[in-house]
Amino acid sequence: MKIKQYSLGIRFFLPAITVPLLIACEGPPGADANATCTQCHNSGSLIVSATEQWRTSIHASGENTDRNATTCAMCHTSEGFRECITSGKTVTSASISNPSSIGCRTCHKIHESYDTSDWELRTKSPVQLMITGETLNQGKGNLCINCHQPRIPDPLPILNGSSVTIRSGYWGPHHSTQASIIRGSGGMELSGSEAYGNSSHTDLTNGCITCHMAAAIGNKSGGHTMKIAYESYGTTAYNFAGCKECHNNTTELTNLLDAVRSETDSLLTQLAGKLREQNILTSNNQINATSNAPLELSSNQAGALLNYLLVKEDRSGGVHNYRYIKALLKNSIENL
């Protein structure tokens, strides 16, 4: 009698497990599972190579997924980004539980349609920049711009405006200021000897991905690594696959790149020195302000500090928009 009860239990228990598993794996109702899955999961190397490239990217590190609060989750967690793109907001409805790093499902509509449209980008809509309110449209690069843009410093200095009180060492545009730098906006355009302008990078049809996601070199650069510079036999090399349409001589381009980065680093160092002289930055180039010891600055002093942080956090060494970056830094130095 006990044996019969046991076998009867198994008879009902196994379907309870297997049926949900089969439903979860087969994709849309009525579609053959093999035909559906093999559209993407086949003998090709696309998924494997893209995954290997992504694993070497900063996005894959997951170092900042602990920034899962409502105001941070959009750009620090996969779940937060998807929620905000759907809602059109820049904050999530709640802190993200069990957050994951920026991965395939963050940017692509993976397993939503169960066909090749799953590769589609989650959004390509033009983006309104937070700091200026301008709309920037760089095609497929719009996906990146949602996060790779400065936040609005509080308080925001106005050219030749009222003085500014800074009460935190974290004041400024936050990290990843690339979109505004490429657009040539967001900084305080102080008067000086250098004219403001933009490089041709401002008008790239697909923005970021043109250069950063060009044909990959293994899992070192390009593709889903999003890297241009990489280490090759102990030296720094560059993947110029996305640059060839405009720059056909890689030797000249390497020399130009090195010169731009050297000049930009020098100007950043000079500006940091001026800011330290006026006790705006500490000896290790941090903002010299706390709630108990705030910084009282003229609007133009605060503007020079903003320009320093915009360029520093852009991290391109001047490459993203050389003309605009040079003008921001040089004119800021002249105004201090």
Image (cartoon, grey):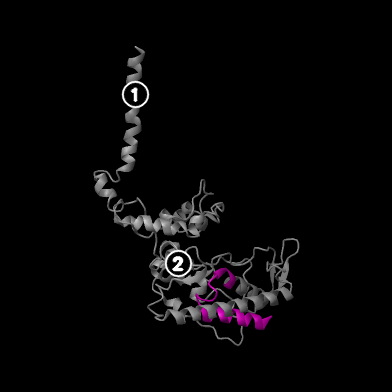
Q: x and y percent of residue 174 in the render?
A: 58, 64
Identify the amino acid type marked 2: Val
Reply above or below: 150 against 66. below
Q: Is residue 46 inside the magenta stretch?
A: no
> Residue furthest toward the front?
233
Judging by the rendered image, the residue that carries numbered circle 1 is 10
In the image, residue 115 above or below residue 174: above
Specify few, some or many for label 2: CA neighbours under 10 Å numbering under 14, 14-19, or 20 or more.
many
SS class of the residue under badge 2?
A: strand
**CA separation, marks 1 and 2?**
56 Å
Residue 336 horizontal/vertical position (percent): 69, 80
- Image quadrant where one finds the N terminus: top left
* Mark nearer the N terminus (1 vs 2): 1
Instruction: Report whether 80 appears left or right of 272.
Output: left
Residue 68 % position (x, y): 55, 52
Write down the quadrant of residue 10 in the picture. top left
What's the magenta bit mostly, secondary-structure-wise? helix
Residue 118 seen by the camera: yes
Instruction: Using the image, determine if residue 76 lies above or below residue 176.
Output: above
Q: Going 47% across and 59% down the picture, which residue do you hit?
A: 56
- Residue at image coords 34%, 41%: 24
Determine which residue is flagged by label 2. 127
In this rendering, position of residue 121 left or right of residue 265: left
Q: Is residue 253 left or right of residue 311?
A: left
Q: Residue drawn 55% across and 67% down? A: 150
User: Where does the image place residue 53, in percent across and percent down from the top left?
Assistant: 42, 59
Q: Does the magenta stretch include residue 317?
A: yes
